[in-house]
Image (cartoon, coloured by chain):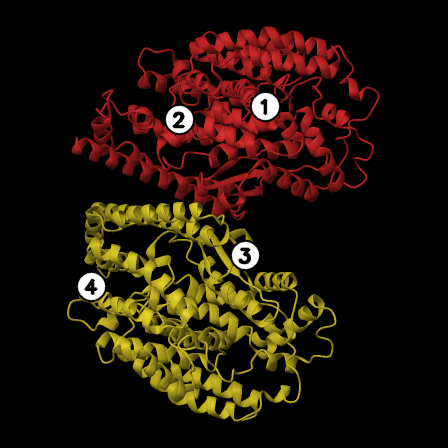
Chain colours: A red, B yellow
Amino acid sequence: MATREASYDALKRELATLNDLRSLEGLAGWDELVMMPSGDGAANARARAMATLAGVIHDKATSKALGALIEACDGTPRGKDGTLRGKDGANVRRAKESYAKATAIPSEMAKKRAELGSRGYQTWVKARESGEYGAFAPVLEEWVALTKARCELIAPGADAYDVALDDYERGMTSARLREIFTVVREGVVPLIEKVYAKDGPKALRGRANPLSGTFDVDKQAELARDVAVALGFDLTKGRLDVSVHPFTGGCGPDDVRMTTRYKADDLLEGLSGCVHEAGHSAYEQGRSVDYRGQPVSEAHSMGVHESQSLLWERMVALSEPFAHFLLPKLQSTFPGRFDGVTEEALYAGYNVVKKPSVIRVESDEVTYPMHVILRTELEMDLLSGKITVHDLPKLWNAKMKEYLNVDIENDKQGVLQDVHWGSGAIGYFPTYIIGQILACQIFNAAKRSIDDLDGQIKRGEFAQLLAWLRVNVHERGSECDSVDELMMKVTGKPLDAAEFVTYLTEKYTKLYDL
Amino acid sequence: MATREASYDALKRELATLNDLRSLEGLAGWDELVMMPSGDGAANARARAMATLAGVIHDKATSKALGALIEACDGTPRGKDGTLRGKDGANVRRAKESYAKATAIPSEMAKKRAELGSRGYQTWVKARESGEYGAFAPVLEEWVALTKARCELIAPGADAYDVALDDYERGMTSARLREIFTVVREGVVPLIEKVYAKDGPKALRGRANPLSGTFDVDKQAELARDVAVALGFDLTKGRLDVSVHPFTGGCGPDDVRMTTRYKADDLLEGLSGCVHEAGHSAYEQGRSVDYRGQPVSEAHSMGVHESQSLLWERMVALSEPFAHFLLPKLQSTFPGRFDGVTEEALYAGYNVVKKPSVIRVESDEVTYPMHVILRTELEMDLLSGKITVHDLPKLWNAKMKEYLNVDIENDKQGVLQDVHWGSGAIGYFPTYIIGQILACQIFNAAKRSIDDLDGQIKRGEFAQLLAWLRVNVHERGSECDSVDELMMKVTGKPLDAAEFVTYLTEKYTKLYDL
């Protein structure tokens, strides 16, 4: 018994060491994008240093010593039920899964992925600039082959897409995704048609959107910072900076670094980008203190991470009560610009459905799911061999017509718009829609257990919601084996796409007077 | 032959890997002092991560594989003279020295030093606050014992202080230091007496110092940044930020991070602090490109590093021609404040000798050497056992009376003023005086080979001086075995304290009309 306890303690120490090194990887990555000087020399030196650190981490993450500790702890009798229980059991399972994945891949394949990641990204950047899909297609072909080969090594004989998904969304499967997509597609496609038949939200018809025009970027940044802090971003445990591509990173729960960007002619993008990252940050800052540095304290998945950003960005900050909180802030930040604007008009202003909706990252919550479903269906079919890389633009454009009634004029506006595939992130897209559905479902559960949450949002009181999320989502970390299991604990039922469709339908029926 | 070539290539790769990890150590250290959020959690996580990284570096720096590569390359026949020549030979020697030192110390002793470093620093902070030397003495006793034990392991039977010195100033010895000190003491002590007999610099008698009063700190920072860039600080290869304790660090020659601080009531401190760090930065940014990541490209020693900061801070920025460059900048940065000020008055203003001179870091270039000699003599005697930790305050105060004619009223103003001993840096102080002498000697050599350097400084042209330093000092890195060897190459003679005494005597005889 003592030996088994000792093994688990030794395993935890080893995992914490890995976490230490990864926190430095996080720091170096953040610094590269936010602070590093602009010279090529600095970039080259950083790339070298990060590759060296990645090598050190890889060696430790695949060491025989770590494997032996995991084996010694796996299923270790503990307590009455005979196994490591609760979070400790999950902690060992998470360690075991990562170890199995890391050791399944020969180091040449890992190097090839790193090399293709960098080359593929560069190729994509150039192809998007020129609009030449033909320049990008060979890279994507390499990625499809490499992803299939990697999935086969990890889980021989299994469906490749299920294995690829697992990198981003533990426990998710293609079959479950198809169920979810059917519900969303059947609810959202007709909703978009109805919305498109109207001339904008009811409260704005014949009026200018109060959010249009240009706004001083320094004042935007000040406002966004105020809002992030009001929502609960803790500046003693993180930083907020400006970078070209907004992201949340840093060194772990006690040192979360979020960035945003501001454009003079897009007030909504800067503000909602900041709220989005504040949601990611809240999840990170809320991770379990008792399991600091352990895998079980990490975010459940990319989908759950996205649910936390979208919960704040969309369920809170695109809500009707939020307009009551935000309007006076806009009025004092931009004197004169919001005089005479009603809460109703502001609410309508930040909920305009894009027509046409061409670019995913610029789309709204109604058309967004269809962008994501389209990409996911295509990458599923790519991995299964049902379609070829060569056919992709044609299929992309056909789906855009079917789902969003858009004619795509060129591949820059179509298949070349996203960074993911060039970097080899196949299986990532569905986490966006999972996040969107979870955000809705989790927010509804919070509403049921918090008295007058709408009133609290109106008054700018977010502490109770944040505390509820801490306990129900953030501190749970990775203790569940799937998102359905997590949702059972948080909301009493598995992931439920219908609840999301209902939310969109009710909200936009009212807004657009459908 | 091929095998030997291969060994040296393999050694260089291994050394570059170590350098990569150290660059991340540099980044994490900089970030901790400049960017990290204020919460205890962030500080604790960073301390953990840095300890883990230090452990990884230690393992690599003491690995048997590295030792074998060094041995294979040591004295490897190459070229006509039969050994690795020039910079490559020095590169192997530097690697061999570091490896020998790192492997001589058992890991318990390394841990003890880390532990005492942190505890000693904290103890010193508290003791300096309260002024109680008794609270600090036990820590210093531990440091003396530990330093002696470490030196004995590194070089059994050798003079402990010689060994301790070598950590900071390769090739320096107590005997050589005593020679240098005699020259400085005999020249500087009577000079101070003569200066003290006068009522300030001639140009300021009966007038206010134009640098006294308060100045907006943001404007100070702007001015200092302009000056640092004018001197040659390359912002594509570094950053300039504000921190509580100014320092130069970062990730290596392509990413040098310097910091300064500004006080409203001390314009000179902020500006000369910035110039000082710009000098350190210039050395780092000027390191050999051909030997990137190799030990031979690193700074020769702490003394030579200090020579580069002091060359710019004192030989350039405290010079008469610099007043011509600086005055219009002061006039435009602080409108009205420097109206009617002459270059002569400004030059006198930044060269006032402190009376009394109590605190080293606040002292001027005339009294500074005596502060440093005092400390070095005391630490030499501590290590040799000639004096005890208990007697230190009494001896300190007696020397202050002898060298600087100061009565020390309490230990806060005396023996407790510096951070070094609490952190175990015994043997560090003399690098300050070595730096001061080298700065003078190197600057004189530059003056001899650059046409009209004074005129260039007047006109704010620093590029030729910087280029000369690049070739003569920066790119040489660690290729020499001692500072005397380096000075032979740079100036044609070994370190020469008399040249420094002459500089001070001539300058202050004129300034003070002695």
What chain letter is assigned to the residue under label 2? A
Of the pair A425 and B68, the residue shown nearer to us: A425
Q: Earlier in the sequence, mark 2 or mark 1?
A: 1
Write down the residue under mark 3: B240
Write down the residue under mark 4: B154
Write down the residue under mark 1: A417
User: Percent x, y for residue B342?
Assistant: 68, 80
Q: Earlier in the sequence, mark 4 or mark 3?
A: 4
Name which residue type carries label 2.
Answer: Ser
In the figure, is residue B208 to the left or right of B15?
Answer: right
Asked if both marks, 2 and 1, belong to the same chain, the answer given is yes
User: In this view of the protein, can residue B79 be seen by the observer?
Assistant: no
Near mark 1 (Cα within 10 A), the count class, few <14, some 14-19 or many ≥20, is some
Give the distance between the C-alpha atoms of the residues marked 1 and 4, in whole angstroms. 61 Å
Give the distance between the C-alpha atoms of the residues marked 2 and 4, in whole angstroms. 49 Å
Name which residue type carries label 4.
Answer: Ile
In the figure, is residue A190 to the left or right of B25?
Answer: right
Which label sits in the foreground, 2 or 1? Answer: 2
Write down the residue under mark 2: A478
